[in-house]
Amino acid sequence: MSIVVSFFTPKGIGSANAPGVGRVRLRETITVGSTTTGTAQEGEWVMIGNNESSMVAAALGSAPNGAATAQTEKTTAGFPIAAGGISMPLEARANDKVSVVAV
């Protein structure tokens, strides 16, 4: 099984609070317990698809840690993605990576 991470520019669908997926610049498939090699560019967002049979936790940052319980300068706190689920669009900072761990 795998985790699919897409880095994209948002495109409005009627509201600044409801961005849709614009042009996808990079898609990367990773395994649970690893981190993307690709990074976000300025203004990009991220979506994460969980193709695993159990929940995972993901995080964004320059040194992301999906197991983190609190945000630091280098990682967000880990957030859950249900088995077979897709994250909501997540605003990324330039050079952010994505880390995914088993819960």
Image (cartoon, grey):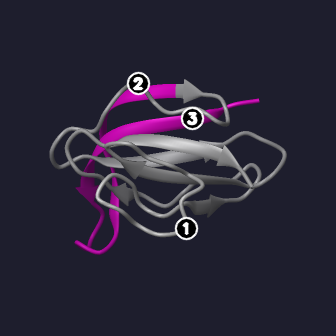
- Type of residue at label 3? Val
Q: Which residues are magenta?
A: 1-28
Count residues near mark 3 (Cα–Cα under 10 Å), then give few for <14, some for 14-19, many for 20+: some
Q: Which residue is mark 2?
A: 37
Front residue (pair 22, 40): 40
**Which disc is residue 83 wearing?**
none
State the CA–CA distance, disc 2 to disc 3.
13 Å
Q: Where on the picture, by quarter, is residue 33? A: top right
Left or right, residue 35 beside residue 94:
right
Label 3 sits on a secondary structure element that is strand
Expressed as whole percent of the image width and height from the top left, the position of residue 10 reads 27, 52
Which residue is found at the position 48% from the left and 26% from the top? 28
Which residue is found at the position 38% from the left and 42% from the top? 63
Q: Which residue is mark 3?
A: 4
Asked if labels 1 and 2 touch by Cβ distance under 8 angstroms, the answer is no
Count residues near mark 1 (Cα–Cα under 10 Å), then give few for <14, some for 14-19, many for 20+: few
Where 80 sits versus 41, above or below?
below
Label 1 sits on a secondary structure element that is loop
Residue 16 belongs to magenta span: yes
Where 83 sits versus 28, above or below?
below
